[in-house]
Amino acid sequence: MDRRDATLRLLAREPASTALLVDFDGSLSTIVERPDDAVPLPGVEAVLRRLVGALRRVAVVSGRPVDFLASHLAVPGLDLAGLYGTQLEIDGRRIVDERVTRFVPAVAAAAAAAESRLPGVLVERKAGLSVTLHWRSCPEREQEIQAVAADLAERHGLDTPLRGKRAIELRPPVALDKGTAVRALAAGCSVAAFAGDDAGDLPAFDALDELVASGGLASAARIGVRTDETPAEVLDRADLVVDGPRALLALLVALAERLA
């Protein structure tokens, strides 16, 4: 039995107690030059609708704000985790960790300062809870952008994880990430899988490992989505590697067909 078939068998074995959790950028959407241009691949919404009706939980876990995810994936019953676990929408209920909201003024001040100090650089404000500085369109300015981000983080009491592709984020120094989101979304399930393509997805893999080790899950599957920019560690850690978002979509379609 190859790894793809083994993963499908695992996820279809106990659908009423299985959680399927998927990243957005680089997984359900191809990587684009400007974040606002990202859209799910054709067919993604349709297959997510099928899976929502067949599995215990289906969720998208992303660095994007929940509002962005909800507007791009209009799938009733789909749960969402945005801003690397800072925002959750589970069973229709929106949750924002109260430890984060007190940093809203600091994030706004850091964003304004970044716009002033980095003309021409894309400064992406995310729901007032974090801000991401991008150098995809100006790779020669990477060191400058990272230096400004580090200075602003120190001035405003923020963290600066390098979790996006060619980007750095300023966010509240609160221990929330895709791993904490996975733990919340996998609660009550016996099987869970997470698919992702970037270093920011590694905490989700870690969470699955810890849940299996502690007995919180009986089984788990880590799915790596290979792109030109996927870190080697993501692929090394994965139980199954698929070649890009289209191959992940094909896997999801195959799962929906098996469940049907």
Image (cartoon, grey):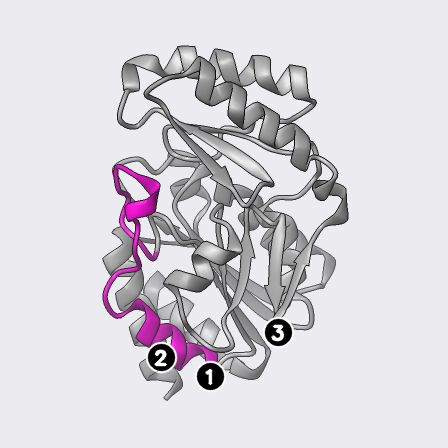
Q: Nearer the viewer, residue 118 or 24?
A: 118
Mark 3 = which residue? 91
Badge 3: few (under 14), some or many (20 or more) residues near its Cα, within 10 Å? Answer: few
Task: Identify the mark nearer the N-term, 1 or 2.
Answer: 1
Mark 3 residue element: loop
Q: Look at 38% across and 81% down and name the residue there.
A: 50
Q: CA gap, disc 3 to disc 2?
A: 21 Å
Q: Quadrant of the N terminus?
A: bottom left
Q: Nearer the viewer, residue 122 or 51?
A: 122
At label 3, which amino acid type do we have? Asp
Mark 2 = which residue? 256
| Residues rendered magenta in the picture | 28-52
Residue 116 located left or right of residue 243: right
* Residue 172, position as x, y percentages in the image: 66, 34
Residue 46 located left or right of residue 189: left
Q: Nearer the viewer, residue 196 or 149?
A: 149
Task: Identify the mark nearer the N-term, 3 or 2.
Answer: 3
Mark 2 residue element: helix
Q: Is residue 10 visible?
A: yes
Q: Look at 56% across and 78% down and name the residue there.
A: 56
Q: Look at 35% across and 83% down and name the residue there.
A: 258
Q: Is residue 95 part of the magenta span, yes or no?
A: no
Cβ atoms at labels 3 and 2 below 8 Å apart: no
